[in-house]
Each structure stands twice: as C-alpha cells, then as structure tokens.
Amino acid sequence: MTPHMNTRRAAALAAVAAMVVVGVQTGTANARPAAPDDGSSASPRTSSPAFSSASARTAAIKSAQTDVSSTAATLKLGAKEKLIARDVIKDAKGTVHTRYERTYAGLPVIGGDLVTHTASNGKLKSVTKATSAKISVPSTTAKIKTVASARKVIWAGSGKPVLALESVKTGVQKDGTPSRRHIITDATTGKTLHSYEAVETAGVGNSQYSGKVDLSTTASGSGFELTDGDRGGHKTYDLNQGESGTGDLVTDDDDTWGDGTGNDRQTAAVDAHYGAAQTWDFYKSTLGRDGIAGDGKAAYSRVHYGDAYVNAFWDDSCFCMTYGDGADNKSALTGLDVAGHEMSHGLTASTANLDYVGESGGLNEATSDIFGTAVEFFADNTTDVGDYLIGEKIDINGDGSPLRYMDQPSKDGGSADYWDSSVGGLDVHYSSGVANHFFYLLAEGSGAKTINGVDYDSPTSDGSTVTGIGRDKAIQIWYKALSEYMTSSTDYADARTATEKAATDLYGADSAELAQVDAAWSGVNVK
C-alpha cells in the first residue's frame, strides 16, 4: 500500500459547519451491463469473497503482484507505468476482481487506480478505471515549486495528468475534529489542483443506547480488559479527554461494564466495543468479509476524545474509530449505527477508496450510512431497533431528531433528495443524500409505509413508483459495486453503472432486481 493510500482517509459522522475530489467519469452512465457469462438468472448470487481464508486472499494478492508486468502489458500501459496489486476478490461465479494502484517512473499516480475483472478461465472480461487518460508527463525531473515536506506524484484525478506535489497540512477542523488536509499542487506552477480532508467522521455491559449487551472481553491479571479475542483482538481505549495517542486500555475488576449512563466512563466504551463487534459480525455474516480490510485484523476504538466534542470519526492512519462525549460530556456519540458508520469508512478506504470530496465524497459518506443502517438491522437489538434514521439515539441536534433521514434526506434541512449538477458542491454529508435515498428506494420502495414502528414516506423526483427488492439484496448490490466496480473518482453516474453491473452479476440481465436498480436511480434523478 502506498503512503498516499495510508493517509488519504480520515472521515466524520456529522457536518457541524458543513464539511465536502474531483470525479473523473469514464464510460456511459446509462449503459446496461452485459449479461453474465452463464446466462441470466433470477436467483441471488452472493457477493462474498470466495477465498477459503484470509491467508488465501493474501496469497492471491501476492500472486497478482507477481504477474503485474504481464497484466500491464495486457492493458497496454506505458513503459514507465507499473501496477501495485492492492486487493483481490473472487466472486461465487469464479470471476476475479483485482484492484491496482499505478506508478509512473516510480512516482505514485493519484487518481490512476483501476480494477480488472477476469473470468474463471483466466480471460480478461473488462477493466474499470478511475481515469481513461493516458498516464504520461513530459518530465519527472522538471524544476519544481518547492513545498515543505511534499512528495512528488503524478496527478491524474482530472484532465491531463501532470507532475505534482502532495503536501499534508495538519490542524483542527471547525468542530474540533483533527484535520489532515492533503493538498496537491502543480509542480511547475504551484497552482492548487486538488485538496481533500483525510480525517473522515460521522457522524456488555450496560450501554447507553443499546441496553444490556454481551461483550467479548479478555482476562488480564486479576481483572478484565476490553480486548475482543473473537474479532481480531479489537481493543477499546479511554483517551481521558486527550486528542492524541491511544489512551488507556479500558479495564474492569468483575467483567461487568458501565451503568448505562454517561456518568460512568465505562458506558461509552461499552457502546463502542459492542458496535465494533456487531459491525465485524455483519461484515463476516452478510458480506463474507473478515474484518474491515478483509485480512482478519482488527481496528481499535477510542472513547472520551476532547472536551465536549460533538462528533465521531474514522482515521485510516491509525486504523481506528474515535468518539467524542457530546456537548454535555455525558452523551457520547457511540450509537450502534454510528459505530457501523465509522468502521465502514475503513471498508470504503480498503476497497474503492472513494475520494472524500464532491460526488465521490457523498458516495463515501452514504456508504457509511448504508452499512451503519445495515449493522443496526443486523444486530436485531430490541433497545435500538433497525431503522432508516441515522444517529437517532445520540440526539446530536439536541431536540430528539435524527442526524439524517434516508427515506427523504432533505428533512434534515440540508441534504439532497435528488441529483442535479450542483450536488458535488455540497458538503459530503449533504451530497450523500442522493445515494442514501437511492438505497432506501431500492430496499423498501417509494410511498408511505411503517417499518419497525417508524413511519416513512419516500418520494421520487418524477413521481414514479419504485418497488423495493428488500434490504438484503440491496446491501449485496451496493457492496459488490463498491468492492468490485467503484474507483476513487466514481461519481453518481458511475455509481449507477457500478450498481447495474453488480445487479447483473448477482441476479441476471433480465432480473427484476436490475430493473429496480434502474428505477431507484431514476427516482433520484440519476439517469
């Protein structure tokens, strides 16, 4: 994994002020994917990786790396271009989807990622590229505009690739979230080409939001610690209002944690630890994925960040989730769907790595909302039942209202219900509304209905009727599209194409599921 890939991701749950890389659209947005090799079928096909173990997946990545020279030749890449294998997924049909980063003359190519799709017989079926531009620059040794601590790269995220410099400016965002802003400048002119925020937010024990829950802990000395040996060794730490480091591993004498209120410091740790466990289990059971990165390795959680910090965030540089305590320092942002949201930023970073700005940034945030919602339904917790409301338990607005609504996103006062050409200019927490609305329509359909005691009434942009295919199928389609067909620069038009391909792979070219994917996208004006 290149240094760029390690530092570009850090995302937050909420846009407190209103937080929002340039998407490069390739191909035709409305093109219908080709039928699967073995004919169409109405029966679902799982999108889970077909490797028998994490070690088998690791071996597949190593094998792909060994073959990068022949792959580059097959793709007719330039003599100075090289591929770096980053992920391999083998689906139930035997198709192998291999994700690559590119270098040019030894320099990382930002926005040059691609995915090859190879049939079970070894024949290359197709390629999905973040950019269709030829990767080439006149010189990599040209006189450059010096930027302190910057690294030299090739910028291919928009237009013609150019020699560029990538620097990182650290600080604090308006709401107190740590900031690590990546700035990409033209190496010869010094002009800013692109920038993005690399800290992505969101935003038993006796838990505050999920009732009494079971926790996987580890005996240590005469007591216990919040280390989940069943799920990669996930640990939960108390930052003690600090803003750096890991803090102290949460421990207890009798393995009974928290009192269900914010007055007990363990309570936030209970919710965070429980949410991480439920998300891990959802990935394993529903997606066939062994942990965030698919390698069986755990992330870790940090609670009690800062003073009255009203947010939560994922940071890929530490591979960890961090939670603030809310405005009163007693309402930690550790709701179940929030935990699922944060861990899913790590999932996105390990797959499509959607740039956290513009339309791709909205898709990044929506992916976390979609999987956070899916985790909540999966957990089947009677205290925090599954719903299509985001952050409804943490009361971040102070009036009992949820942070976001998937059935009609504009009810939060800022999110977009439908796509238009200005959506990419919104903060990513608001542009995400288009994809959140699409997912709700695909899963549940349009119109009025009541689910788990919550009333919904989802409209469409053109008054059309969408018939839901069910949440389980919608989740499989979104995950397959994310992990196999989306790239860092995917925009909404590309996302439609990616989900069409995923639905075709899973259910067939003539399936009702594919027809409703099209109907749901049309319902949010992505046509």
Image (cartoon, rainbow, N blue to C red):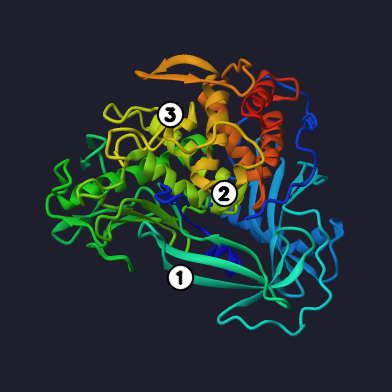
Instruction: Check disc 3: other Cα within 10 Å, few if <14, some if 14-19, many if 20+.
Output: many
Point out which mark residue 388 bears: 3
Residue located 87% across and 59% down the image: 76
Look at the numbered disc 3 and give the secondary structure of its residue. loop
Calculate the distance from the C-alpha at mark 1 to the C-alpha at mark 2.
Answer: 20 Å
Residue labelled with disc 2? 361
Look at the numbered disc 1 and give the secondary structure of its residue. strand
Q: Quadrant of residue 192?
A: bottom right
Q: Nearer the viewer, residue 282 or 516?
A: 516
Q: Is 85 above or below relative to 289?
A: below
The three-letter amino acid code for the residue at tag 2 is Gly
Instruction: Check disc 2: other Cα within 10 Å, few if <14, some if 14-19, many if 20+.
Output: many
The number of numbered badges drawn on the structure is: 3
The numbered mark, 1 or 3, whose residue comes first in the sequence reads 1
The three-letter amino acid code for the residue at tag 1 is Thr
The three-letter amino acid code for the residue at tag 3 is Tyr
Residue labelled with disc 1? 170
